[in-house]
Amino acid sequence: MSDFKVGCSPLTSRLFAGKVLKNGTWGQTKYDVTDTAVSAVAKHLLQLEEKVQFTYKGELYELKVEKVVDK
């Protein structure tokens, strides 16, 4: 049995979605969803007017969306 997962490639930093096997490896089919996933997360945060904090390699980070004003 396999699960559907989204993960970040350590080699390319691209985001992939697809089936992951029981042993933790990607199955036969995976899709590069980098642009779609980043856009979806940004729109999600914007619509909910939220920011998200997470830890990576022991450091705390924060994602938020800010409107850019043209000069």
Image (spheres, helix red, strand yellow):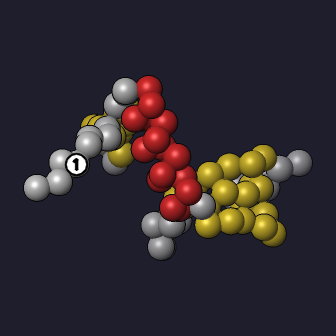
From the top left corner, tell me how far across and down residue 68 is, in percent: 22, 48
Q: Residues within 10 Å of mark 1 (few under 14, many from 20)?
A: few
- In the depicted structure, whether residue 32 falls above or below residue 48: below
Is 43 rendered above or below residue 36?
Answer: above
| Residue 23 visible in this rendered orientation of the protein | no
Q: Nearer the viewer, residue 28 or 35?
A: 35
Question: Could you tell me which secondary element the residue under label 1 belongs to?
Answer: loop
Which percent across, then down, holds residue 25? Answer: 71, 61
Residue at 36% over, 45% down? 56
Q: Is residue 22 above or below residue 47?
A: below
Asked whether 63 or 39 is in front, the reply is: 39
Residue displayed at 26% across by 43% down? 67
Determine the residue located farthest toward the front in the rendered image. Answer: 71
Report the residue marked by disc 1.
Answer: 68
Residue 53 occupies quadrant: top left
Residue in the picture at 60% in, 61% down:
33
Residue at the right extreme, as displayed: 1
Most foreground residue, 62 or 50: 50
Residue 21 quadrant: bottom right
Picture quadrant where residue 65 is located = top left
Q: Does the image show residue 50?
A: yes
Image coordinates for residue 18, horizontal then vertical, percent? 73, 57
Q: State left or right for residue 40 relative to residue 22.
A: left
Residue at the far left: name it.
Answer: 71
Answer left or right for 53 relative to 30.
Answer: left
Q: Quadrant of the C terminus?
A: bottom left
**Amino acid at circle 1:** Val
Residue sitting at the far bottom: 11
Residue 48 image position (x, y, % from top left): 44, 26
